[in-house]
């Protein structure tokens, strides 16, 4: 490569997102379920926020954490879907270098944030079931706010090195990213430099976040199950488990695609590229869509408030 061409790519002004290579002819058809998922995610999460704000009876720890999760889901899906749909519909593949790094930061930090809020909600369910008399004194509004800020700052501090590392590498090969959005490994893999620091650091973050949050969730639900099995009757056990079943389903909805995506990216080198890209989109889009549905269906208070919202009042 000539020096002039190499210089042009050291700090590329734009990257080119290819969408889903190999499935270009199906982009429009793929966009239909993607668009539907995004619409459901927007409607569902805004509905959760509206209902919790509207109903004073829902102003409690579980629902505050649920609102934090809903805001995270809204921003996470919005950080990726509009650009993905513009690629599918208008072939608008260019994204600025700074815009790509910004999208990268939001994708990874919000994913870590969502994992943290799942762990916080597990802790809330543990206190509510195992120590119900002290629930309101342990999880005060001030404590909830501190937990929410701690989860947010953990995400920022862990993920901020991602764009900083990506910005320091020289890009002298190409500016084409075979994906629908900018993730760390998709970007730094284009660098013509030793990127082992980025690889090691991203692996450290993934393992640290996964181990910490899974530990909190596992310990919380182990204690919850022990408390449930000590209850005297089957009806009491079912009723108590029902109070945290929605959260347990939401944990599975987020963590199963997350773990599968992580494993396929690290070890699934023989899988077709379009499978990797589709799995990455499933991981980012499906939890924001399913979370409000799960909580709306499985949580009696939200379901009751939703029915009241759409039931005309009698004079």
Image: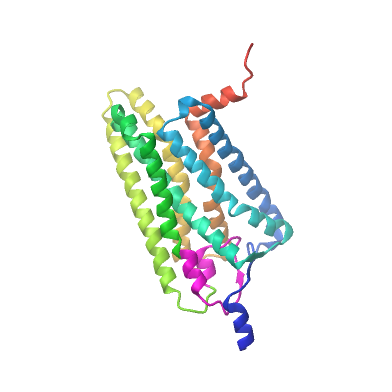
- Report x, y in % for residue 86: 69, 57
Is 88 displayed left or right of 56 in the figure?
Answer: right
Is 3 displayed left or right of 164 in the figure?
Answer: right
- In the displayed structure, 186 sits above or below 238; it is below
Say which quadrant the N terminus sits in. Answer: bottom right
Visible in this render: residue 228?
no
| Residue found at x 32% / y 49% | 215
| Residue found at x 43% / y 50% | 152
Given the current orientation, which residue lies at the most extreme top position?
A: 315
Specify the segment rendered in magenta. 162-189
- Report x, y in % for residue 65: 44, 39
- In the displayed structure, 138 sits above or below 56; it is below
Q: Quadrant of residue 240?
A: top left
| Residue found at x 44% / y 56% | 156
Is 302 displayed left or right of 31 in the figure?
Answer: left
- Report x, y in % for residue 251: 43, 44
Marks counted in the figure total 0
Given the current orientation, which residue lies at the most extreme right position?
A: 90
Visible in this render: residue 240?
yes
């Amino acid at each position: 490569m000539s020096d002039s061409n190499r210089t042009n790519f050291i700090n590329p002004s734009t990257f080119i997102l290819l969408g889903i290579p190999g499935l270009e002819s199906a982009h429009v058809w793929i966009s239909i379920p993607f668009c539907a998922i995004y619409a459901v995610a927007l409607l569902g999460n805004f509905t959760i926020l509206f209902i919790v704000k509207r109903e004073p009876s829902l102003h409690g720890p579980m629902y505050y954490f649920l609102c934090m999760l809903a805001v995270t889901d809204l921003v996470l899906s919005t950080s990726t879907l509009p650009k993905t749909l513009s690629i599918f519909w208008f072939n608008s593949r260019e994204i600025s270098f700074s815009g790509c790094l910004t999208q990268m930061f939001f994708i990874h930090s919000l994913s870590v944030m969502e994992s943290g809020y799942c762990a916080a909600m597990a802790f809330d369910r543990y206190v509510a079931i195992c120590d119900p008399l002290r629930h309101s004194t342990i999880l005060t509004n001030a404590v909830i706010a501190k937990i929410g800020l701690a989860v947010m700052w953990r995400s920022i501090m862990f993920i901020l090195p991602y764009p900083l590392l990506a910005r320091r590498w020289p890009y002298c090969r190409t500016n084409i990213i075979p994906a629908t959005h900018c993730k760390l490994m998709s970007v730094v893999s284009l660098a013509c430099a030793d990127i082992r620091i980025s690889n090691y650091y991203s692996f450290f973050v993934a393992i640290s976040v996964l181990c910490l949050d899974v530990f909190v969730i596992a310990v919380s639900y182990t204690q919850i199950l022990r408390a449930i099995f000590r209850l005297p009757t089957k009806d009491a056990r079912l009723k108590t488990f029902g109070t945290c079943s929605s959260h347990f389903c939401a944990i599975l909805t987020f963590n199963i695609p997350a773990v599968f995506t992580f494993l396929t990216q690290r070890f699934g080198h023989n899988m077709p590229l379009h499978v990797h890209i589709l799995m990455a989109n499933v991981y980012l889009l499906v939890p924001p869509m399913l979370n409000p549905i799960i909580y709306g269906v499985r949580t009696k208070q939200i379901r009751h408030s939703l029915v009241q919202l759409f039931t005309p009042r009698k004079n």
